[in-house]
Amino acid sequence: MLILAKAVLAFMIGFILSIVFGVILIPMLKKLNIKQSISIFIKKHIDKEGTPTMGGLIFIIPTILSVVILLLLNKLELTYNLGIVLFVFIAYGLLGFIDDYLIIKRHNNIGLSEFQKLIGQILIAVIFFMLFRFSGREPVLEIYTLGLSINLGWAYWLLILLMLVATTNAVNITDGLDGLAGGLSAIAFLAFGMIAWASLGIEGNEDIGVFCFILVGALIAFCFFNSYPAKVFMGDTGSLALGGTLAAVSIVSSHELTLIVVAGVFVIETLVCIIQRLSVRFTGRRVFLMTPLHHHFEKLGWQELDIVKMFWFFGIVLAALAILWGVWI
């Protein structure tokens, strides 16, 4: 019951602070003319032009404030693992903020170049890798369900870098419809909150679980403003922070492989983009009408709400399977 009470407290603090912050921030973003530029290739989204962006601040700042409040109330301990997860959360959020700022300043849909963004993502991932390695963690991949511990050696550290960069880009790619990335992220962090709490043998995992539930509450509050028709977009400020943090949580909780299942929809969206690029490059033909995958369904005539609901459904199913894999089985 104590764990349940902590989960509810964490969720409610994150939710309430984010609702209040959203009510205050969105009018400020409008007043400062911080608006989204829409791609000319998606005609259905023309009416979204001018919607405020940088909405990721609605869940980033309240989540950090919630952590501080719980620390002051002695309801949370700032463990080493939680500290490096917070570093990733803030660092990727700042990288996304810079990208969004440049887009707004230039009045187009071009912020940091792909190369600049990739360098920033790799740099943050390398710092996380160094901090994580300093904690004394062995380069071992745990597969709890099968009772296996595989020492990957140097390949494990390469895996960590790949996970952070890939997951960050995957969430960023998926953030294309109202409520899509926010809802899927809330589902993913809910799953990892439960998985982290079930991994009590790892120091600090209870606090990682509390952090996840704070973020779930904040994300659900964000979806109140971001669901169709969106009053604000999260921008790269939010999507980069969510992707990097999702990977970091899976790593520190020793459930690296579980991330593939939890983030299954994000993974599929990314694979579709890769398949499309390779097909166009080597055959000159498109496999999909448009990428990422959610835009393919739009081109088929699906309504935005129906696409989001379908993706959320698969996200919930995959999260449930991941909890079975990571906790019960």
Image (spheres, helix red, strand yellow):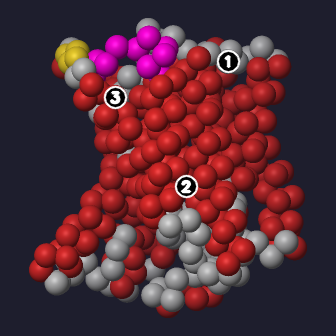
Judging from the image, what secondary structure is the residue with disc 3 in? Answer: helix
Which quadrant: the N terminus? top right
- Using the image, tell me which numbered label, if any, was put on residue 47: none
Q: Residue at x 65, y 65 (%)?
A: 100
Residue 10 colored in magenta in the image: no
Judging from the image, what secondary structure is the residue with disc 1 in? Answer: loop
Q: Residue at x 22, y 22 (%)?
A: 152
Q: Amino acid at mark 1?
A: Leu
Q: What residue would you read off at disc 1?
A: 78
Q: Nearer the viewer, mark 1 or mark 3?
A: 3
Q: Amino acid at mark 2?
A: Ser
Q: Are marks 1 and 3 in contact (CB under 8 Å)?
A: no
- Cα–Cα span, label 1 and label 3: 24 Å
- Cα–Cα span, label 1 and label 2: 24 Å
Q: Work out whether mark 1 precedes mark 2 in sequence or the reverse, and give the earlier one.
A: 1
Q: Nearer the viewer, residue 229 or 244?
A: 244
x and y percentages locating residue 151 in the rendered image: 22, 17
- Using the image, tell me which numbered label, if any, was put on residue 157: 3
Which quadrant: the C terminus? top left
Using the image, determine if residue 285 lies above or below residue 63.
below
Magenta-tinted stretch: 132-141
- Around disc 3, counting alpha carbons within 10 Å, would you say few (fewer than 14), some (14 to 19), or many (20 or more)? some
Q: What residue would you read off at disc 2?
A: 239
Q: Residue at x 83, y 19 (%)?
A: 72
x and y percentages locating residue 9 in the rendered image: 72, 28
x and y percentages locating residue 189 in the rendered image: 51, 39
